Image (cartoon, helix red, strand yellow):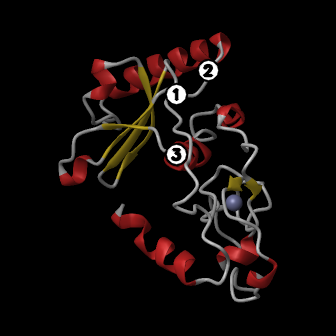
Amino acid sequence: MAEGVGVWQATAENPWPRPWPESVPLTPCAALPLTEPLRERLRQIREHQMAEHRAGRPQLVCGVFYDEEVVCLRAGGGHAAYLGTDGRVHYENYGEGFDKVVLTDPRDVASTIVKCSADIGVPELIDLLPARPANGFVCRLCEGSRWESPASTGDPDGRPWCCRRCRGLGWTLAEPSAAADSDAFPPR
Ligand SMILES: [Zn+2]
């Protein structure tokens, strides 16, 4: 989690309610509900990735690619993420030698899928992320779009950022609070 520390500190300091109150349980997301056509496309992508890998473009560095039927979502900088045809998202911090894990926190699953699905040509994977539960609220930073506005990130010419508040889910579990409104965050 070291990568996200700055983001979390900024969030904790801002006057908005915390997006994920500890008192409200968050339902785990064990796997994306892949349809058979999507599964088939993932198999085609996997075949292509495996051919690239064999051709000497060593994009795929983790054993999970051989152990399980997965496609590589991203690999580089010591981190890799894979999506299995069973809908599970695998994450490995190989740079620091940690064992691979299956992501079940819906926020981790969402941020991985939102950031990577277009890169592998299957943006519709985003539609399979957990929908806002009855006790959830539309994310007030991205207004449910999953992406932050360029004005909010302070990087108007850069690539869009996956929302730092909802982490790509488009919703949070924070209680709405009229008193918490502030111009301090996001920066304008
Ligand atoms: Zn958001």
Q: Which residue is mark 1?
A: 31
Displayed quadrant of residue 54: top left
Pick the front one: 44 or 80: 80
Q: Which residue is mark 3?
A: 112
Displayed quadrant of residue 47: top left
Identify whether 60 is placed above or below 49. below
Farthest residue in the front direction? Answer: 23
Residue displayed at 78% across by 55% down: 144
Tag 1, which secondary structure? loop
Q: Please state, as top left, top right, bottom left or bottom right, where the N terminus lies in the image.
A: bottom left
Q: Position of residue 173 (x, y in %)?
A: 66, 57
Q: CA distance from mark 1 to mark 3?
A: 13 Å
Give the mark toward the camera: 1 or 3. 1
Q: Position of residue 9 (x, y in %)?
A: 47, 78
Pick the front one: 49 or 154: 154
**Residue 127 image label:** none
Give the mark toward the camera: 2 or 1. 1
Q: Which residue is mark 2?
A: 34
Tag 3, which secondary structure? helix
* Amino acid type of the residue tagged 3 in the rendering: Thr
Q: CA distance from mark 3 to mark 2?
A: 16 Å
Identify whether 124 is placed above or below 151. above
Displayed quadrant of residue 64: top left
Residue displayed at 60% across by 65% down: 164
Q: Are marks 3 and 2 in contact (CB under 8 Å)?
A: no
Q: Where ligand 1 lies, by quadrant?
A: bottom right
Q: Are marks 2 and 1 in contact (CB under 8 Å)?
A: yes
